[in-house]
Amino acid sequence: MDSAKRRSTWSRALWLTLAVAWLTGTVAGLAAMAAYANRPGMPAQAPAEWPSATRLPRDHARPTLIVIAHPKCDCTKATMAELTKVMGSVGSAVRSFVVVIKPAEVEAGWEDTALWATASRIPGVTVVRDAGAREAALFGTSTSGQALLYGADGRLLFSGGLTASRGHEGENAGETSVLRLVQGAPPLDTTTPVFGCSLFSGHPAPAKGE
């Protein structure tokens, strides 16, 4: 084989190797992204009864829906979109809070983000600043986007997420279960996975009751 043919063969082999490496890296990257999108966060260890130490007012005439949120979690934008749909369907049949954590050591205004503004625009929702993440701890939550539905009698009816994966909008078991419970129908599930950022990543989690 003359030198020109050798160079041509070597060049084809090099390009083939590079193409295989690129394809392998792309597939691996897509697989990693899919795995991340479908990996739930830590579920809440929520009290079975409405905690007496909470500063959130429980409604004694209708269910109370709480969503705990990290103000800088992009995944939770989808939760706010699904919460908007829920509130649009149930209206005044439920009392709803979005509890936005503010760890004790962060600067003033840290929690005033686009997510706070979005939550504030949802009809029927009261947005609460959770100083020191006290409420998040009382309700046993660890993941942004955690939803908890308590009945008028104070019993926990549902604990889970309102999205099917991280940052993904659309019909899902959590949203449907909350809607059915508020409407007095049996839920699809009483617990569902929560897809969101860690509430306390980079910040110490407070003890319950602090």
Image: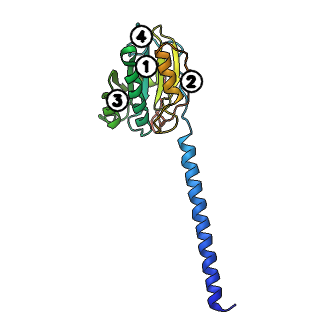
Who's the residue at 50% across and 24% down the image? 176
Q: Please tell me whether mark 2 sits on a helix, a strand or a loop.
A: loop
Classify mark 3: residues with Cα within 10 Å, few (<14), some (14-19) or many (20+): many
| Location of residue 127 in the rendering, given as x and y in whole percent from the top left corner | 34, 25
Who's the residue at 59% across and 56% down the image? 27
Q: Which residue is mark 3?
A: 119
Quadrant in which residue 136 is drawn: top left
CA gap between label 2 and label 1 equals 14 Å
Q: Which residue is mark 1?
A: 65
Amino acid type of the residue that numbered disc 2 sits on in the rendered structure: Thr
CA gap between label 1 and label 4 equals 10 Å
Q: Which quadrant of the figure contains the C terminus?
A: top left
Amino acid type of the residue that numbered disc 4 sits on in the rendered structure: Arg
Who's the residue at 40% across and 12% down the image? 58
115 left or right of 1?
A: left
Q: Which residue is mark 4?
A: 62
Q: Which residue is mark 2?
A: 191
Label pair 3/2, CB-CB below 8 angstroms:
no
Q: Which quadrant of the figure contains the N terminus?
A: bottom right
CA gap between label 3 and label 1 equals 14 Å
Amino acid type of the residue that numbered disc 3 sits on in the rendered structure: Ala
> So how many labels did they put on this image?
4
Classify mark 2: residues with Cα within 10 Å, few (<14), some (14-19) or many (20+): some
Nearer the observer, 158 or 185:
185
